[in-house]
Image: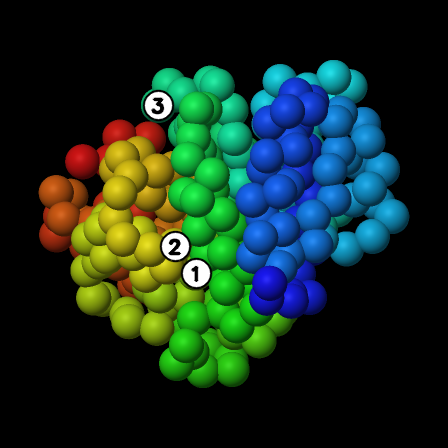
Amino acid sequence: MRVSSHAVLVVEDDAAINDVVCTRLRRDGIEVVPAFSGTEAQMLLSARAFDVVVCDLMLPGATGEDIVAFVRQQHGALPVVIISAKASPADKVSLLALGADDYLAKPFDLDELAARVQVQLRHGAQGRPGSAERLQAGRWTLDAQARTLSVDGVEVPLTRTEFNIAEMLAENPRRVFTKQELFERAWGEPYAAQESTVAAHVSNLRAKLKPTGTDAYVQTVWGIGFRFCAEPAQGSGASAHTAGTVS
């Protein structure tokens, strides 16, 4: 068995599912801590550090949505992978917009879940290769080491995926990225998601940037994808508005 320094919190009230998930992740040498209620998960998150949280939605005590909000408030970019029987596109978009990093509908393949957890661990351990330590883009300052984005010196709390998207766009100003390119480079895995997944993360990124007045840096090129531009759009087919309806 490979030995890892990573720790994963598995929050699932069904003891059988919790057990098989923990057993599968331990096969990868990961330290796994089970929790069987949202309240227990919050206590554990307050007591020690984790690298990834795997979380069901329908939990006793605090709900999965509560856990996502708690993680974002207390732990910044700590990745959260949702596992849930709620599988509609609206459910997925809602959770991704709330701040979840990934979403896997039940029933799911254990190896696929383990692979998705490994993706989040890789993002946290090293970021994306080739990034400069600090990047200045308009009023943005991106720190590749700390995985943070600041506007005029004030940090904007982002999830890992949101930061990856912002960094990729800012490193390549004016280049238009398709949704597939954004997914494969920001998630670090082959494109196998609905377009709404990418749109939800871009929309959430813009919403967090809106109070800074720099949400318009992330522009939509209709029918193609997204680009970074620190200058106002000139009505040439790019839009800086939130992605409620992204083609």
Up/down of 144 relative to 54, above or below: below
Residue extending furthest toward the front: 1
Residue 131 location (% of width, % of height): 42, 78
Which mark, by number, is residue 235?
none
Q: Earlier in the sequence, mark 2 or mark 3?
A: 3
Residue 190 visible to the viewer: yes
Q: Earlier in the sequence, mark 3 or mark 1?
A: 3
Circle 2 Cα neighbour tier, 10 Å, few/some/many (<14 / 14–19 / ≥20): many
Q: Which residue is mark 1?
A: 164
Residue nearer the viewer, 94 or 118: 118
Residue 241 visible to the viewer: no
Q: Is residue 159 left or right of residue 228?
A: right
Q: Quadrant of residue 130?
A: bottom left
**Distance between the Cα atoms at labels 3 and 1?**
23 Å
Residue 143 location (% of width, % of height): 55, 73
Q: Is residue 245 left or right of residue 21?
A: left
Q: Which residue is mark 3?
A: 89
For numbered disc 1, what is the local secondary structure?
helix
